């Protein structure tokens, strides 16, 4: 079993990576709980919820299943889950288990953070993408004006990454999650980036995938521990997300996967970095890799004005200046304030010059 520790001023916690570890949850918990609520989605519930329920010796284990997809991170679903927690008699000694991808982790974590002013929860990611979102204690739901605008910093007591669950991922979810590992490599590890660019997702083995995920986790943990509340360098983890989040909101949550949106955002980040900073980055390498591995791009010129407006409402915007994460070189991130007019010009150029479509 691979083990990583995240040191947090709020609550330090351990990440366990092991195949079939979902059958061992009670042994990894440090205390007994009065009741347990498993929050999962329609895709994951039929695969793994029974395994987890049967691993607990008592009968106060409840499962609530919500629709799969980004649109579920809504105020209505958040309220519904609080209602179910109350109906099942959860109290301050209860535990919530977030079983699923990044959507479930964000949503269930925010429910745990707010139910009776906060109860314990466990992150159980079942996607590649969730290796990133399950670590760091950021929990949230979406607003129609932007992604993750309603949320909190609230770390789990444990992250249990059963790598066996990755075997059931559809190809699109593999693409989505891999974009976040590429992001982490671009932030901090050029050798990892080169290794990622040398693989094809179609022929990727579970062993190789686990090694890539582990490397990505190490990068994220280092940034999170140094800046828990995202006041400084933790913002680097938003690389590719300025445009990525705006695209998700513009198109409607779930039309693009998060990773597909981030992939487009990473290409835009390179475009801006080259022009704003004179950076020399592996543009063609990344474009060819995304194309080879089936990433999609619906970006058009008629979206530009609305995308800029959405970005201006993003939580990373300060005094009407977009705090965009750029790269001086691979593993050389900086925070660069951009005015809306300049961002719009870059976005138009990104589309017209054809880099977004190559």
Image (spheres, rainbow, N blue to C red):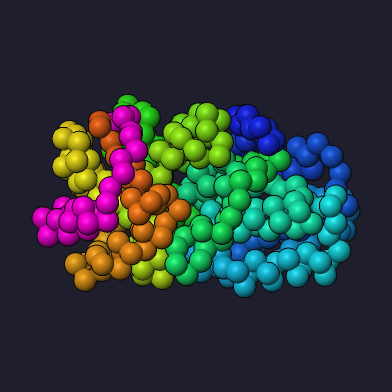
Q: At which x and y percent is residue 131?
A: 52, 43
Examine the rendering and report whether any part of residue 159 can be seen.
yes
Q: Identify which residue is drawn at 21% across, 45% down.
A: 272
Identified at 71% across, 56% down, the residue is 114
* Residue 164 placement, left or right of 336: right
Does the magenta-highlighted stretch encompass residue 346?
yes
Task: Give the residue displayed 40% in from the left and 38% down from the top.
Answer: 236
Position of residue 252 in the picture relative to residue 228 (left or right): left
Relative to 22, 35 lies left or right: right
Stretch of the chain drawn in magenta: 330-358
Please name whichever residue, 50 or 234, is drawn nearer the observer in this view of the structure.
Answer: 234
| Residue in front for this viewpoint, 228 or 282 | 228
Q: Quadrant of residue 261?
A: bottom left
Q: Does any portion of residue 43 appear in the rendered image?
A: no
The picture places residue 224, in percent across and down from the top left corner, at: 53, 34
Residue 307 place in picture, x, y as percent? 31, 64
* 307 up-or-down from 315: above or below: below
Picture quarter with the C terminus:
bottom left
Q: Quadrant of residue 75?
A: bottom right
Which quadrant of the rendered structure holds the N terminus?
Answer: top right
Q: Is-magenta flag for residue 46?
A: no
Taking depth in this image into account, of 217 and 118 the one nearest to the observer is 118
Residue shown at the point (47%, 60%) measured from the top left: 147
In the image, is residue 48 above or below residue 201?
below
Left or right of residue 201, residue 148 in this image: right
- The percent coordinates of residue 205 (x first, y second) are 43, 41
**Residue furthest left in the image:** 353
* 270 to 334, vertically: above or below: below
């Amino acid at each position: 079993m691979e083990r990583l520790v995240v040191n947090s001023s709020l609550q330090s916690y351990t990440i366990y990576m092991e195949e079939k570890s979902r059958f061992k949850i009670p042994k990894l918990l440090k205390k007994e709980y009065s009741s347990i609520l498993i929050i999962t989605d329609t895709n994951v519930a039929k695969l793994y919820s029974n395994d987890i329920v049967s691993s607990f010796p008592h009968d106060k284990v409840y499962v609530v299943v919500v629709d799969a997809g980004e649109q579920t991170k809504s105020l209505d679903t958040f309220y519904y889950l609080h209602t179910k927690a109350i109906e099942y008699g959860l109290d301050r000694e209860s535990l919530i288990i977030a079983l699923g991808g990044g959507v479930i982790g964000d949503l269930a974590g925010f429910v745990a953070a707010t139910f009776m002013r906060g109860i314990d929860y466990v992150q159980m990611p079942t996607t590649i993408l969730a290796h990133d979102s399950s670590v760091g204690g950021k929990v949230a739901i979406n607003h129609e004006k932007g992604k993750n605008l309603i949320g909190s910093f609230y770390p789990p007591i444990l992250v249990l990454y059963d790598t066996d669950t990755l075997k059931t991922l559809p190809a699109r979810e593999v693409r989505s999650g891999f974009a976040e590992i590429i992001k982490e490599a671009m932030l901090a590890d050029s050798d990892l980036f080169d290794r990622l660019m040398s693989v094809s997702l179609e022929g990727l083995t579970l062993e190789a995938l686990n090694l890539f995920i582990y490397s990505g986790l190490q990068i994220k943990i280092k940034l999170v521990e140094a800046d828990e509340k995202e006041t400084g360098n933790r913002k680097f983890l938003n690389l590719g997300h300025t445009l990525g989040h705006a695209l998700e909101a513009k198109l409607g949550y779930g039309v693009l996967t998060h990773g597909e949106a981030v992939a487009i955002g990473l290409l835009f980040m390179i475009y801006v970095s080259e022009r704003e900073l004179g950076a020399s980055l592996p543009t063609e390498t990344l474009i060819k890799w995304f194309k080879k591995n089936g990433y999609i791009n619906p970006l058009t010129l008629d979206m530009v004005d609305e995308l800029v407006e959405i970005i201006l409402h993003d939580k990373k915007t300060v005094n009407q200046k977009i705090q965009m994460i750029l790269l001086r070189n691979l593993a050389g991130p900086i925070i660069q304030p951009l005015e809306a007019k300049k961002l719009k010009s870059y976005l138009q150029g990104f589309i017209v010059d054809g880099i977004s479509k190559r």
